Image: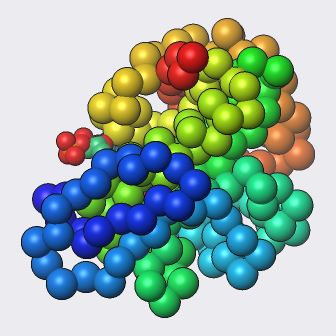
């Protein structure tokens, strides 16, 4: 199933090199750049419309660009992304994990999460957590289920968003030590 072509990860360790079995353009996992902003917001908001992710405006993405990692093809098309959000000096949230539907099931989701974890380590975080319905995905990446009560500020943020009228589906919380 995981048969996309060579993945280059400049600035990060070789994450999950996968053998190339088909002729596909090379895919690069890298930190996001300004040129990615519109595609990033579109990718995330496509899933936000299904309430799988929280919506992000292009302005929010642009302002937090340094927190995003992307998978792009040779033509600069954004195929997948993940974002890191500081929760506390030692804990960060992995958010906005999204893979273009046509490219799911090839390991790109795993690789952008691994790249975001790498950025988290570089920034000195020792634990990451994620809110998601994709239990099998996060478990496969070494995350354990944890009560959301472990992150009271996250709960408070959800409550604020609900009060603002954002439609939020209750999700499970997953955490992983990256120390
Ligand atoms: C969840 C998502 C990011 C997975 O991306 P992907 O590139 O298809 O995942 P991978 O190919 O890296 O799969 C890794 C493992 O996760 C599991 N998995 C994949 N997609 C899954 C999904 N939608 N739900 C649950 N588990 C999933 C599989 O067990 C897979 O293991 P395998 O390789 O042994 O089959 C992708 O389906 C997506 O964009 N979903 C919509 C947005 C979303 O729900 N994001 C997560 C919330 S932060």
Q: Quadrant of the N terminus?
A: bottom left
Q: Is residue 5 above or below residue 94?
A: below
Q: Is residue 136 visible?
A: yes
Q: Nearer the viewer, residue 69 or 55?
A: 69
Q: Is residue 96 visible?
A: no
Choose top left, top right, bottom left or bottom right for residue 34. Answer: bottom right
Residue 44 % position (x, y): 61, 63
- Residue, x 31% and y 48% (percent of image)? 16
Choose top left, top right, bottom left or bottom right for residue 69. Answer: bottom right
- Residue, x 57% and y 69% (percent of image)? 43
In the displayed structure image, the side of residue 152 where residue 63 appears, left or right = right
- Residue, x 74% and y 39% (percent of image)? 85
- Residue, x 65% and y 49% (percent of image)? 83
Residue 105 % position (x, y): 26, 57
Q: Quadrant of the C terminus?
A: top right
Q: Is residue 53 above or below residue 130?
A: below
Q: Nearer the viewer, residue 12 or 98?
A: 12
Q: Looking at the image, how many numbered discs can be counted on the residues? A: 0
Q: Nearer the viewer, residue 55 or 9?
A: 9
Residue 108 % position (x, y): 38, 58
Q: Is residue 176 above or below residue 103?
A: above
In the displayed structure image, the side of residue 165 where residue 178 appears, left or right = left
Taking the view exactly as shown, the residue that stands out farthest to the left is: 21
Residue 122 % position (x, y): 67, 35
Choose top left, top right, bottom left or bottom right for residue 119. Answer: top right
């Amino acid at each position: 199933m995981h048969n996309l072509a060579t993945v280059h990860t400049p600035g990060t360790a070789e994450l999950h090199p996968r053998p190339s079995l088909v002729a596909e353009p090379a895919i690069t996992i890298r930190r996001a750049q300004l040129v990615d902003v519109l595609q990033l917001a579109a990718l995330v908001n496509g899933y936000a419309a299904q309430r799988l992710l929280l919506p992000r405006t292009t302005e929010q993405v642009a302002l937090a660009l340094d927190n995003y990692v992307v998978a792009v093809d040779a033509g600069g098309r954004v195929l997948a992304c993940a974002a890191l959000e500081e929760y506390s000096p030692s804990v960060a949230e992995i958010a906005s994990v999204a893979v273009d539907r046509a490219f799911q099931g090839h390991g790109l989701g795993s690789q952008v999460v691994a790249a975001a974890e790498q950025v988290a380590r570089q920034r000195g975080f020792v634990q990451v957590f994620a809110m998601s319905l994709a239990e099998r995905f996060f478990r496969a990446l070494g995350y354990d289920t944890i009560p959301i009560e472990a992150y009271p500020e996250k709960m408070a943020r959800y409550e604020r968003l609900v009060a603002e009228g954002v439609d939020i589906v209750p999700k499970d919380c997953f955490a992983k030590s990256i120390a």
